[in-house]
Image (cartoon, rainbow, N blue to C red):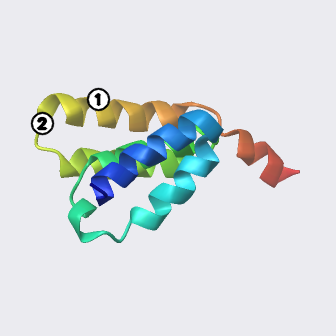
Amino acid sequence: MPSPVVELNRAVAVAMAYGPAAGLEIIDSLRNEPVLKHYHLLPSVRGDLLFKLGRRAEAAAEFKYAATLTRNQQEQTLLEGRAKAALATPDPQAKDREN
């Protein structure tokens, strides 16, 4: 059955097969889905794909947001750690913007 959650899962599969940009395109089309509004996995997956694309600051913001959406302390800790790691990892696009 088609649903926004199934489409989110498809976005992950597309990202694995065709790259993070392809998956991100699908995820971005899901951002206004009411069912996913408070679903922590949407910003979590989005953060992962942004990180893979080298968009570290955006990834960190998504991980931080995802952490606020889950009540599970272990998931919060994991997501907050991913946000810190994203900010601590050099952003390859920053060099491109400086040149």
Q: As rendered, which of 74 and 13 lies closer to the eye?
A: 13
Q: For the N terminus, which image quadrant?
A: bottom left
- Left or right of 49 on screen, residue 70: left
The amino acid type, in three-letter code, at marker 1 is Leu
User: Which label sits on residue 72?
Assistant: 2
Residue plotted at (55% across, 46% down): 50
The amino acid type, in three-letter code, at marker 2 is Asn
Q: Position of residue 54 (x, y in %)?
A: 64, 41
Q: Position of residue 29 (x, y in %)?
A: 47, 66
Task: Establish if 51 lies above or below 62.
Answer: above
Q: As rendered, which of 70 and 2 lies closer to the eye?
A: 2
- Mark 2: few, some, or many residues within 10 Å (few <14, many ≥20)? few
Nearest to N terminus: mark 1 or mark 2: 2
User: Which label sits on residue 27?
Assistant: none
Between the C-alphas of marks 1 and 2, the distance is 10 Å
Residue 47 visible in this rendered orientation of the protein: no
Residue plotted at (64% across, 34% down): 90
Tally of numbered tags? 2
Q: As rendered, which of 36 and 92 lies closer to the eye?
A: 36
Q: Position of residue 92 (x, y in %)?
A: 72, 39
Disc 1 designates what residue? 78
Residue plotted at (20% across, 51% down): 69
Residue furthest toward the right?
99
Asked whether the beta carbons under mark 1 and mark 2 sit within 8 Å of each other, the answer is: no
- Left or right of 84 on screen, residue 14: right
The residue tagged with tag 1: helix, strand or loop? helix
- Mark 1: few, some, or many residues within 10 Å (few <14, many ≥20)? few
- Left or right of 64 on screen, residue 70: left
- Left or right of 85 on screen, residue 65: left
Q: Position of residue 48 (x, y in %)?
A: 47, 39
